[in-house]
């Protein structure tokens, strides 16, 4: 039944079921790979190094795919630091993060876009699309700064809600850069965590975590403020956005 008591159309029901199954699949995949850790990253590193001079490109491709199936990004980034050092390794990690964002976004759009729109309703979905066009890029950047949120899971959600692929790629590049350096540098310094590089990485991580906390707080307050707007105030805010 819909909100007004009328029967839910069969097409909408099928979209909702498909979205629910997709979400359940992602959660199961997250547990199996991200929690149970069935993927051995050491084996991955050995396979990558066997490719010789193409190892950085191979690691970008493999790491992007592994990130999309919820292998923890910090572990992949640290492996990049061990294999390629802090400089090249940071670029390898960063492009891997962009690849993961694009892969997850495309899968999320393909598997969950229709279901998300059907669940929200056409009017809300259109309003969300308009918001995405204006603020989707910075939503992706902001999410990358918030600690504790899976980048892959967020990318699937962004794809389902229609964030364009270019915004995913650019947002992942901007938002992932600090953490790419942090975890790669720590991986490169694994034998000497008292080295200046390790201290620098820890300092950058602290700054990023603080910035992420402010981003999360500001986003939550903005969301609460929008939900508290009266219909007339919401209309005025929309007019201000359109004129800006």
Image (tube, rainbow, N blue to C red):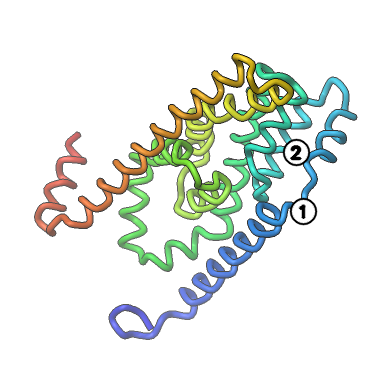
Extreme front residue here? Answer: 194
115, above or below 236, in the image: below
Which of 241 and 201 lies nearest the eye of the viewer?
201
Disc 1 crowd rating (10 Å Cα; few below 14, some 14-19, many 20+) is few
In the picture provided, is 216 more to the left or to the right than 191? left
Q: Residue at x 70, y 20 (%)?
A: 192
Q: Which circle marks residue 38 in the picture?
A: 1
Quadrant where the C terminus sits is: top left
- Residue 223 x/y as whole percent: 27, 50
Quadrant where the N terminus sits is: bottom left
The quarter of the picture where residue 216 lies is top left
Q: Residue at x 43, y 67 (%)?
A: 118
Q: Residue at x 65, y 49 (%)?
A: 70
Classify mark 1: helix, strand or loop: loop
Q: Disc 1 and disc 2: Cα gap in Å? A: 16 Å
Extreme left residue here? Answer: 232
Which of 75 and 176 lies nearest the eye of the viewer?
75
User: Which mark sits nearer the N-terminus, 1 or 2?
Assistant: 1
Which of 79 and 1 lies nearest the eye of the viewer?
79
Which of 230 and 28 lies nearest the eye of the viewer?
28
- Residue 25 x/y as whole percent: 63, 64
Dots 1, 2 in contact, CB < 8 A: no
213, above or below 92, in the image: below
Q: Which circle marks residue 62 in the picture?
A: 2
Extreme top residue here? Answer: 196
Task: State which mark lies toward you, 1 or 2.
Answer: 1
- Residue 83 x/y as whole percent: 77, 25
Classify mark 2: helix, strand or loop: helix
């Amino acid at each position: 039944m819909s909100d007004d008591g009328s029967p839910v159309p069969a097409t909408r029901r099928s979209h909702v079921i498909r979205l629910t199954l997709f979400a359940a699949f992602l959660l199961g995949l997250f547990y199996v790979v991200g929690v149970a850790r069935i993927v051995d990253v050491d084996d991955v590193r050995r396979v990558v190094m066997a490719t010789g001079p193409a190892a950085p490109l191979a690691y970008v491709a493999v790491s992007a795919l592994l990130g999309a199936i919820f292998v923890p990004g910090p572990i992949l980034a640290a492996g990049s630091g061990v294999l390629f050092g802090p400089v090249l390794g940071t670029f390898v990690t960063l492009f891997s993060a962009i690849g993961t964002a694009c892969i997850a976004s495309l899968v999320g759009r393909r598997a969950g876009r229709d279901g998300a729109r059907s669940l929200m309703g056409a009017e809300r979905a259109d309003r969300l699309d308009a918001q995405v066009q204006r603020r989707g890029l910075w939503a992706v950047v902001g999410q990358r700064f918030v600690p504790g949120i899976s980048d892959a899971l967020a990318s699937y959600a962004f794809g389902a809600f229609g964030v364009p692929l270019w915004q995913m790629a650019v947002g992942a590049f901007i938002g992932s850069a600090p953490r790419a350096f942090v975890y790669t540098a720590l991986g490169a310094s694994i034998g000497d965590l008292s080295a200046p590089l390790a201290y620098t990485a820890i300092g950058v991580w602290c700054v990023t975590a603080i910035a992420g906390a402010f981003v999360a707080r500001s986003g939550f307050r903005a969301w609460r403020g929008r939900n508290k707007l009266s219909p007339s105030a919401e209309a005025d805010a929309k007019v201000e956005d359109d004129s800006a």
